[in-house]
Image (spheres, rainbow, N blue to C red):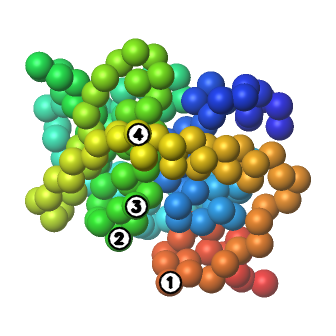
Amino acid sequence: MEGLLSQRDGVQAGITGVQVNYYFICKTKLWLFSHNTQMEQESDVVAMGKVIHENSYARNKKEIRIGPISIDFIKKGDEILLHEIKKSKKMEQSHIYQLLYYLYYLKSRGIRARGLINYPNLRRTKEVELTKEKEEVLREVLEDIKSIVLKKRAPLPEKKIYCRKCSYFEFCWVK
């Protein structure tokens, strides 16, 4: 467990963008994923997302890894633009906070950037800005993620409308 979260600050603790994303979707999924119970490879929904990711924005170098974060792609010009590619807007809050975490992580290392969430299937883009208010929320989220991950047991699952499409559905609900 110490290896998962060994530092005080969430940014230094190795928290990934996926963990921030899962925090807003399901705390059980967050805990399972953080404890190497990863079932995404079995999911058709995840496979569809990977196809969209691989076939969109083909001219850009993808999966830019910086410490614990992995940015879909970056464009540099007068400013640095981080891009996240998502399949749909159904989990938009989790997408926004994942990208906010990337902006926060880079800011903590002296790099200013802006963020865009790309929904190629919808032909839409959403701009994400790291404000002081969102930074404060994000700090609380990172602290909460640390406390969830450090628990000995996964939080009990809560039935949500999207559980049936989750790659952890059988783990949580099939007996």
For marks 4 and 3 on the same chain, the one whose residue lies earlier in the sequence: 3
Residue 170's mark? none
Residue under label 3: 93
For marks 1 and 3 on the same chain, the one whose residue lies earlier in the sequence: 3
- Looking at the rendered structure, the secondary structure element under dot 2 is loop
Residue under label 2: 90
Image marks 2 and 3: residues in contact by CB distance under 8 Å: no
Instruction: Name the residue at 74% across, 34% down.
Output: 4
Closest to the camera, between mark 2 and mark 3, is 3
- In this picture, residue 56 sits left or right of residue 82: left
Q: Is residue 12 above or below residue 136?
A: above
- Looking at the rendered structure, the secondary structure element under dot 1 is loop
Residue under label 1: 161
Assign the C terminus to one quadrant of the image.
bottom right
Mark 1 and mark 4: Cα distance apart in space? 32 Å
For marks 4 and 2 on the same chain, the one whose residue lies earlier in the sequence: 2
- Looking at the rendered structure, the secondary structure element under dot 3 is helix
Mark 1 and mark 2: Cα distance apart in space? 11 Å
Q: Amino acid at mark 2?
A: Lys
Q: Is residue 150 above or below residue 105?
A: below
Q: Amino acid at mark 4?
A: Lys
User: Front-most of 130 and 78?
Assistant: 130
Instruction: Name the residue at 47% across, 29% down.
Output: 105
Q: Amino acid at mark 1?
A: Ile
Residue under label 4: 132
Q: Is residue 151 above or below residue 75?
A: below
Q: Amino acid at mark 3?
A: Gln
Looking at this view, name the residue that lies furthest to the front. Answer: 133
Give residue 139's quadrant in the image: top right
Mark 2 and mark 3: Cα distance apart in space? 9 Å
Mark 1 and mark 3: Cα distance apart in space? 15 Å
Instruction: Name the residue at 65% across, 29% down.
Output: 9
